[in-house]
Image (cartoon, rainbow, N blue to C red):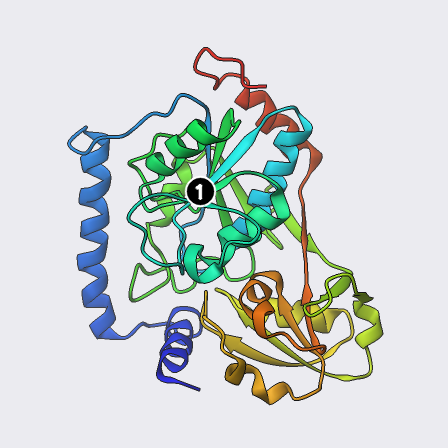
Amino acid sequence: MNLKQSFHLWLQRQWYDTPAPNPFLTGLERVFLRAVELRQTAYRTGRKPIERLPVPVIVVGNLTVGGTGKTPLTLWLAGLLKQQGYRPGIISRGYGGKKQAQPLIVGPDTSPEEAGDEPVLIARRSGCPVCVFPRRAQAGRLLLATADCNILIADDGLQHYALDRDIEIAVVDGARGFGNGHGLPAGPLREPPARLQSVDWVVYSGIGPAGSTVMTLTSGSAVNLANPDCHRPLSSFVGDPIHAIAGMGNPQRFFDDLRKQGLAVDGHAFPDHHAYRPEDLGFAGSTPLLMTEKDAVKCRRFATANFWFVPVQARLPAAFGEQLLTQLKTKTHGQKAA
């Protein structure tokens, strides 16, 4: 385990397994939360500009660092909109990719080292035009100029206040919640939990309070990285030793999901957005190695016959989709959205 992995695991323990965070980190937390407050005020009072694009914008994001299920929800939302006749484009920061001087259009064959792992995954799965750039409004303008879009989904854009939005959806990890409840770096929070009071929708991933909107992720088969036409039911791995890797905010969730399906998994956690190298996975030998679809984007170029990824599908209550579409009809800026 290298230094980066060790630090990542140490932080995860501080955030989710330690009741009282490190005193040094709580001192830094006060500085961070004050900066967050000043930044929010600057946008709210007009001292920092907010750009409005000429189509509706739906933001999908969360309050914590790391994965909560934003990407599956973004894919589900894109599918819902396409079914209703909308033509969605998807914009993202492109975390994990190279720093870009200009917005980058992302396609199924774009390198994840260039654009980041999640935008490439989204481009492959959604069939929608995708663009990445830290300034999301510029990414949106490029999509509107070059692709046939009439609505935009901003993936992981909750804290990007420079882009105006019509609907905000916050995703919360139902199992881990907000960890120790502290802000960065003492805890996983990028904004205080009170921020949820101002969003349009809160979606809980996995489990949630009574009456809440809960998103579940389902999977039933694995896809071979070396031969994507080869699919194998997860049940066929039962009884055999299995390695699994996950480079995400909560790797344990992936390992637990596999174990719930009866697999004897030896899990190996990596930092979120980890840039895999062949030597990172040498422990697997010829034993089957299961990974998330996000990991597979970065491992495909050196995949061997025993590498498999497990795609997931988001499922949400029908009422959530119906109410979201009803809300969207009032957010067209005087244009026809579909």
The amino acid sitting under disc 1 is: Cys
Q: Quadrant of residue 227?
A: bottom right
Q: How many numbered marks, from 0 up?
A: 1
Task: Locate the N terminus by quadrant.
Answer: bottom left
- Residue 146, how many percent across, how many down? 46, 31
Q: Is residue 209 visible?
A: no
Q: Quadrant of residue 7?
A: bottom left
Q: Badge 1, how many Cα within 10 Å: few under 14, some, many 20+?
A: many
- Residue 324, how many percent across, how many down? 58, 28
Q: Is 319 situated left or right of 61 in this image?
A: right
| Residue situated in front as seen by the camera: 21 or 286 | 286
Q: Is residue 5 above or below residue 211?
A: below
Q: Is residue 336 above or below residue 6?
A: above
For label 1, the SS is strand
- Residue 73, how many percent across, how many down? 58, 45
| Residue situated in front as seen by the camera: 245 or 184 | 245
Q: Is residue 273 visible?
A: yes
Which residue does the numbered mark 1 point to in the structure image?
131
